[in-house]
Amino acid sequence: MISAWSADDVRAAEEPLLAAGAPLMARASFALATQVLADLRARRRHVRGARAALLVGAGNNGGDTLHAGAVLARRGVAVTAVLTAERVHGEGLAALRGAGGRVVELAAAPDRAPAVAAEVSAADVVLDGLLGIGARGALRGPAADLVTELTAVVGMESAEHDRSGSADSIPTAAGGVTAGAGRPWVVAVDLPSGIGVDDGTLPGPVLAADRTVTFGVAKPGLLLPPAARVVGEVTVVDIGLEPVGPPAVRRLEAADVAVSWPVPGPSDHKYTRGLVGLVAGTATYPGAAVLAASAAVRTGTGMVRYRGSEPVARTVLAARPEVVTATGRVQAWVVGPGVPTTRDRDDPADDGQHDRGRGALAVARGDLPGMPYGPVPAVVDAGGLPLLGETSPPWFVLTPHAGELAGLLRSRGEDVHRDDVEAAPLRWARRAHELTGATVLLKGGVTVVAGTEGAWAQADAPGWLATAGAGDVLAGILGTMLAARATDVVERPALAAEVAAAAALVHGSAAERANPGGPVAALDVAEAVPGTVSTLLGLR
Ligand SMILES: NC(=O)C1=CN([C@@H]2O[C@H](COP(=O)(O)OP(=O)(O)OC[C@H]3O[C@@H](n4cnc5c(N)ncnc54)[C@H](O)[C@@H]3O)[C@@H](O)[C@H]2O)[C@@H](O)CC1
Ligand SMILES: [K+]
């Protein structure tokens, strides 16, 4: 698990260490220099004669960068520091000068930004030390001008990396261009300057990094979209920080999902493994029902009970004979894949799915005292979203994409559109959680989950997964995972968000497994789930 703490929590963790005289900046800058030297060696085989450009801001982030530059200069690297503030970290500047580094004062002559950017872009490596956790809003002043010029030369998208990363690395959520000839390797110091440290927004110009060397612990903005696209490979270096309190954002790794996977034992049967009830598909969209049912079956449900019109049920059964249509006990409902929204012009006929969906959600909420088998978790997707009541329990997991989330929020009085959601996914997922009470899984290149405790950000899926039917498959996977832990999820609703994050990991990993590095079809993703799960379980 990768855990990220807010800027305030990081400062609170630093305070007692600094008071006790711990040399945090020395640790941070030495680790940074060590990583930059390793990157230079990997890229050019030797470091002597390499050119490094330091982008230096007013604060301690600039101090880390100047101290690291001094280490590089002592190793024979030709180091130039570009100072974007009139006052920068004094000790760091003295160390760099003492080691033979050159200094360019941009703050005193801001109109030189284009010429300085041209020089910086000719370096082998650029260290972005303009702003760290002290950032307030978008980059301003000479720093903003310099980054704007540089992004024009160097490009916004960061490099494609080896997705496996190393033990202390977080694989990138990026997947852009490779830093190649003519483009310097960009190392962000603590974080790419100008990202929203705690919310992952991109409020202004940001120089996309190939690597981020972050100190002590990850910061939320490194995990969250859209900033997660510009952080490159994240390397967390230990400087002795121990934040107290829960992390603000977490990311599950494969091993975490492996240890919590409900592996059936000799006494298990279909009811202990969990039954999934599925209200999905209409005559217009029967495929969604097939995809969700296939995914649920392939994820290892005890059984799928399908609810829908007879022709669609026949289609589902033809694809998955394991599915039953008889009524009975259900441990998690999946409501909405392939069900039209109330305004859907393509499919005026709902085949009775809205009534079935409302009924299922009432049982899942525990609203029907006479009814057995409730309350239970529910996945509410697509056409299920307009069926929600005013409030929902946190064991309901809503699975909108950005457009659907904007619609849900507008229906509850927020003036928000798809673009707003894409610019600040965590903010709006949280808002939807506050307004509905439900756990919210916002689908996207990086999936964000907001629940009763903290948030999750999963970056497991290849871009190829953005394809029709992929969401139906996710709903089936998540339904099975919730059904397997139904009682726990209702008793401890914070678990719903963790299970949702785990489902996003399984879904993304299955897409990668279905066709590594190439296009995937939704049904192929469902078919790849059993192999994905057995590979995961091998990590236990
Ligand atoms: N506290 C410590 O001892 C440690 C801090 N470390 C480093 O220190 C950083 C935090 O240092 P600071 O608190 O000095 O903060 P920053 O280095 O992020 O700098 C903040 C300063 O930048 C300016 N600024 C803020 N927002 C701006 C904007 N939008 N545009 C332009 N200028 C802006 C302001 O002058 C502000 O005081 C961390 O990110 C990390 O790199 C590390 O050395 C580890 C130890
Ligand atoms: K930085």
Image: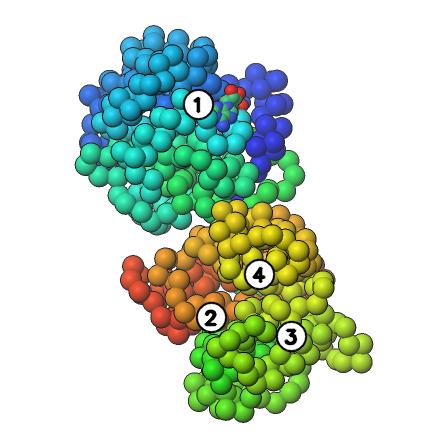
Q: What residue is at 40 percent from the left and 40 percent from the top?
A: 231
Local SS, label 1: helix
Disc ID at residue 473: 2
The amino acid marked with disc number 1 is Gly
Q: What residue is at 69 percent from the left and 79 percent from the top?
A: 359
Q: Position of residue 52 (x, y in %)?
A: 28, 23
Alpha carbon of mark 2 to alpha carbon of mark 1: how far? 47 Å
The amino acid marked with disc number 4 is Gly
Q: Earlier in the sequence, mark 1 or mark 4?
A: 1
Other-residue count near label 3 (Cα within 10 Å), few / some / many at <14 / 14–19 / ≥20: many
Q: Of 303 and 438, which appears nearest the observer?
A: 438
Local SS, label 3: loop
**Which of the 4 quarters of the picture holds residue 43?**
top left
Local SS, label 2: helix
Other-residue count near label 1 (Cα within 10 Å), few / some / many at <14 / 14–19 / ≥20: few
Q: Is residue 264 above or below residue 157?
A: below
Other-residue count near label 2 (Cα within 10 Å), few / some / many at <14 / 14–19 / ≥20: many
In this figure, which residue is indicated by the disc labeled 3?
Answer: 331
Q: What residue is at 57 percent from the left and 85 percent from the top?
A: 351
Mark 1 or 3: in front is 1
Q: Earlier in the sequence, mark 2 or mark 4?
A: 4
Question: In the rendered image, is residue 253 in sight?
Answer: no
Q: Is residue 535 above or below residue 216?
A: below
Question: In the rendered image, is residue 152 in sight?
Answer: yes
Q: Earlier in the sequence, mark 2 or mark 3?
A: 3
In this figure, which residue is indicated by the disc labeled 4?
Answer: 407
Q: Earlier in the sequence, mark 1 or mark 3?
A: 1
**Which of the 4 quarters of the picture holds residue 97?**
top left
Asked if disc 1 and disc 3 are in contact, CB closer than 8 Å, the reply is: no
